[in-house]
Amino acid sequence: MIAISNPKQLNRHILTAALLLCGTFVFSNRSFAGTIVDGCGDNKTITLVNSSNWVTLCSQKVTLPTTQNCVLTGSAEVHNNVTSLHNEYRFTVDKDINPLTGKKGERLLDVTQGSGADPSDLSVSPVNDMKSLAAGTYTFRILARKDNIADDIDITAYTLGVVCSDGQ
């Protein structure tokens, strides 16, 4: 509680509060700790039809002002509309548009139809960390592709989260 004994003191408190509110507004999108948070996502259906090339589900361009460590988290919902017994699909989060398969951030999802073992909708969540990325602009992506002779499948929702920090 503020004790006010004269009008000049009241004006000073009002001015101080106004300056603090203006500062909060002006600097609300700034991070003084060097952390960047961004991402993308949508609920538009994308059908995986190719086992040779990755499909970008969504991508986010991020500019790093200094060397940073980044963590990418992805999530995708897969609608089980396959007709073959076993179907495998690859999911990853990466800065490369066509990364090699088998990298640490990749997840392999086996979708089974016919045995009643898998539900109609499945989720997969690839995570990847990237250390000491130099200052510059990067495009981070959540990617998916069929593996070998899998049936075509629908991805019905997907998100990508990017958190980068200079570690200070």
Image (cartoon, rainbow, N blue to C red):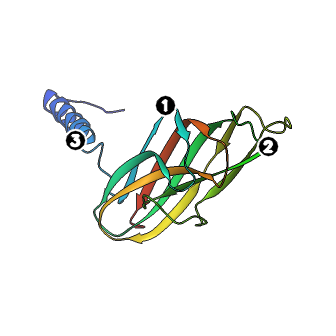
State the quadrant of the N terminus: top left
The residue carrying mark 2 is 85
Nearer the N terminus, badge 1 or badge 2? Answer: 1
Determine contact: label 1, label 2, CB under 8 Å: no
Secondary structure under the numbered disc 1 in the rendered image: loop
Q: Image quarter for residue 12?
A: top left
Residue 22, x across and y down, in percent: 21, 37
The amino acid type, in three-letter code, at marker 2 is Leu
Determine contact: label 1, label 3, CB under 8 Å: no
Comparing 162 with 153, the one in front is 153
Is residue 138 placed above or below 87 in the rendered structure? Answer: below
The residue carrying mark 3 is 26
Comparing 159 with 8, the one in front is 159
Which label belongs to residue 44? 1
The amino acid type, in three-letter code, at marker 3 is Val
Nearer the N terminus, badge 1 or badge 3? Answer: 3
The amino acid type, in three-letter code, at marker 1 is Lys
Comparing 72 with 88, the one in front is 88
Label 1, label 2: how far apart the Cα atoms are: 26 Å
Label 1, label 3: how far apart the Cα atoms are: 35 Å
Label 3, label 2: how far apart the Cα atoms are: 57 Å
Which label belongs to residue 131? none
Is residue 119 placed above or below 130 in the rendered structure? Answer: above
Q: Residue at x 68, y 33 (%)?
A: 81
Q: Which residue is drawn at 30% across and 44% down?
A: 29
